Image (cartoon, grey):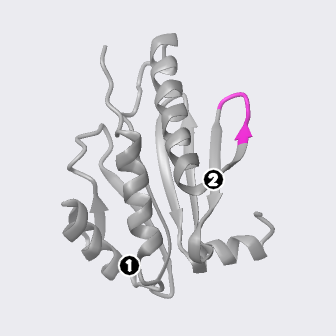
Amino acid sequence: MTWKSMPPAEVCDIMDFWIAAPWPLTEAEAQRRAVERFGWTIDDENGSSYLMNTVSNFTTADVMTIAYKNVMRELSFDTSDTIRDITPESTDFLNDAFTLMVREGEAKWGKPALRDSEKAKTARWNVHGGARVTFGFLPRGLSARFETPHGAEVERKLGDV
């Protein structure tokens, strides 16, 4: 079985794009920027717009965007295929890809805050402008999350340092 993951430099370049964006942005503005910059698409369903990363051709193309009062707080997406049948080989593949993503992130943003539990790992950076970047590892796949400066500030106030 073969699986796909984004090259670490691509993941970090996507995060750098969001770090440099002129926050605050509305959800629609963020979606439009993603379409223009990355070639992602917007899917309309029942009157709601959903951002999709169809370029990477992963198992799951959904890009989750969270906004409050139409101000973007967070954007997250898969950086690998979703593993349906977890095996030692698939776990090794994801672990290697995660390690390379973290190394690339560390070269760009410095030492991350690492969390490692039995089933999940995260690496999180506080980056320029008060935003945060988090890379996640689960046995079923890898993800990247960008918290806007506003979204990160709300989380900090709620105690998520």
Q: Earlier in the sequence, mark 2 or mark 1?
A: 1
Q: Residue at point 31% right, 13% down?
A: 1
Q: At numbered mark 2, what does the secondary structure look like: helix, strand or loop? A: loop
Q: Residue at x 77, y 72 (%)?
A: 158
Front residue of 15/148: it is 15
Q: Residue at x 59, y 80 (%)?
A: 150
Query: The magenta stretch spans which residues?
Result: 115-119
Residue of label 2: 110
* Mark 2 Cα shell of 10 Å, populated few (<14), some (14-19), many (≥20): few
**Residue 55 coordinates in the image, percent (x, y):** 20, 49
Please identify the dominant SS of the magenta region: loop
Q: Quadrant of the C terminus?
A: bottom right
The answer to whether residue 123 is above or below residue 147 is above
Q: Residue furthest right?
A: 159
87 left or right, relative to 3: right
Image quadrant of residue 116? top right
- Give yes or no for residue 161 being in the magenta stretch: no
| Distance CA(mark 2)–CA(mark 1) | 29 Å
* Residue type, mark 2 in image: Gly
Q: In the figure, is residue 83 to the left or right of 119? A: left
Q: Could you tell me the amino acid type at mark 1?
A: Glu
Residue 58 against residue 74 in the figure, above or below: above
Q: Is residue 101 left or right of residue 14?
A: right
Mark 1 lies on a secondary structure that is helix
Question: Picture coordinates of residue 108 (x, y %)?
Answer: 52, 54
Using the image, tell me which numbered label, if any, was put on residue 59: none
Residue 79 as seen in the image, left or right of residue 66: left
Task: Report which residue position mark 1 lands on.
Answer: 27
Q: How many marks?
A: 2
Q: Residue at x 51, y 20 (%)?
A: 91
* Visible residue check, residue 44: no
